[in-house]
Amino acid sequence: MTLDVVFLFLQQGVASGLVIGSVYALLALAIVVIFKTSDVPNFSQGEMVMAAGYIALYLLVFRSMPLWIVMPATILAAYAGAALFRRLVLNQVARANGSPVNLVIATLGLSYVLRGFVRQTGFGDTPRSFPPVVEPQSIMIGQAAVTTLDLVILATAVVVMAAFFWMFKYTKIGRAMRAVGMNPKAAQLVGVDLTRIHMIVWGLSGGISAIAALLISPKVLMTADMGSIVTLGFAAAIVGGFTSLPGAVVGGFLIGIIENLVGLFISSRAIVLAPFVAIMLVLVIRPQGLFGGRVEIKKV
Amino acid sequence: MAEHLLEVVDLTVKFGGLTAVNKFNIAVKRGTIHALIGPNGAGKSTTFNCISRFYQPTTGRVLLDGVDVTRMPASAMAGLGVARTFQNLELFGELTVFENVMIGAHVHAGRSWVEVLSARPPGVVEHVEHLLERTSLTAYRNTVARNLDFGHQKLLELARALAIRPRLLLLDEPAAGLRNREIAALDALLTDLCRREGITILLVEHVMQLVMAISDRVTVLNFGTKISEGTPDDVRNDPSVIEAYLGQEMAHA
């Protein structure tokens, strides 16, 4: 391999990695924001992405609605669905038996329900593809070939992440979320309504999942099992420390870039392994993740 | 305005087969310091958790200024002017001293967009600085809460509770783990809060030195039932109280 080729591959790998990585970063953000505020890893995150994708597909293809209605409608539906699940199901589970394990099992239950529902409708029987938001045209950045669709994906993801970080840092609701993440008891003490905050957190997580679905669907074949893409979101979250929102974003981009570099330099068959090798390396060298802060020592 | 700021009526709390609190009544007069004492496991903290709405009582009612709050969520109590501290501290460990108190003050910062965006509403910062000064925390303003020693963490929890601008302050063992000098300072601060600012205080405490010095009224709880109530002197000389604390033989000795 000549030096020219190495440079070419590097540029291409980073460019493609940033694009797909931005979607992983969104997924990781959706996972981490729920975990941070309720200690529950949401195992239905992938199915939330999948369900949102099918809602959009249904409205767009089977109801022939215009895209400018379909996108907000999908995001709103995902927001409402996720918030309602938190309020109607998880709150009840938490009240009956507050142990986090039960909540995790409930999210697993939701993932089966959503997958079963999509199979039931029959839309998931044949892999479908989703019409892209913009007609992909090839563009060269340096020596890397990307498409206009890629640029739209990256730009949208970055804007969504920026808006989310602004909300989390500067608005009253964002501050309330951080307070709940640090100490739910103390948060209630100063007047934060836990039920409301949990609903909003789940709603936001659902909304972000829907945006990720809209961005990724034109690039992948849609099936009822497409939720497995969220495994990479989990990988990104773990690399970032699982409780750090900036960590989730950096983790997302890292996983995306690693995947692409491995695909170019080693073999396209090694791509599926790359994220897991990355997780293992991070867990061995820095168990708390890249942004996980110091290791907490618990008094027993 | 009801004469009693806080009334607890026939409060019963059962955890499975265990009756932690049994038909307990207490009425706290406006503008007084009222102490709730009793041996370990008497049900003091359970009563506290019912008043601040972290526990749901099995039966009974909690009235705040004559209004039934028994069904209210815990998060609503701050808005109603009820603040509390915890025996085992519940601080925002990663935030600074200043930020911890600011969060408490936010309850009164309103919800308008302007205030949400400006994030540090005018007037609030001054109030927070004032509270830090009163609790002798000004020097630790920018220290991260988890790095404070225990005594200062307790003061910080008190400062955060005061930032809510409470009518009723519930203190769960404020003197536990403090040194003698710190207890004297706490004594002066609590008396001042009550006498000068009219904040009604209900405290659970084991440090009798503090209880007897500052309380207007003392209620004694044992095995979930009220066994005595009155002025500090009344309670100190009540044989049933001595028996509860020291055992039967000592009481008759």
Image: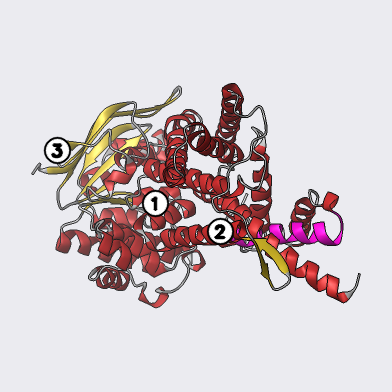
Mark 3 to mark 1: distance in Å?
26 Å
Q: Which label sits in the foreground, 3 or 1?
A: 1
In the rendered image, residue B251 lying in the magenta stretch gets the answer: no
> Residue at 47% of width from left, 28% of height from top?
A96
User: What's the magenta bit mostly, secondary-structure-wise?
Assistant: helix
Percent coordinates x, y for residue A267 in the rendering: 86, 55
Mark 2 residue element: helix
Q: Which label sits in the foreground, 2 or 1?
A: 2
Quadrant where the image shows the N terminus of chain A: bottom right
> Residue at 57% of width from left, 45% of height from top?
A213
Range of magenta residues: A249-267
Percent coordinates x, y for residue A271 in the rendering: 80, 52
**Number of numbered discs overlaid on the protein picture:** 3
Residue type indicated by callout 1: Ala
> Residue at 55% of width from left, 59% of height from top?
A152
Percent coordinates x, y for residue B68 in the rendering: 20, 34
Which residue has dot 2 on it? A152
Which residue has dot 3 on it? B66
Q: Is residue B8 left or right of residue B149?
A: left
Using the image as rendered, state which of residue A199 and residue B211 is in the foreground: A199
Mark 2 to mark 1: distance in Å?
39 Å
Mark 2 or mark 1, earlier in chain: 2
Task: Check the residue under mark 3 and report the chain it is in.
Answer: B
> Badge 1, how many Cα within 10 Å: few under 14, some, many 20+?
many
On the question of residue A288 being in view, the answer is no
Which residue has dot 1 on it? A187
User: Do dots 3 and 1 share one subunit?
Assistant: no
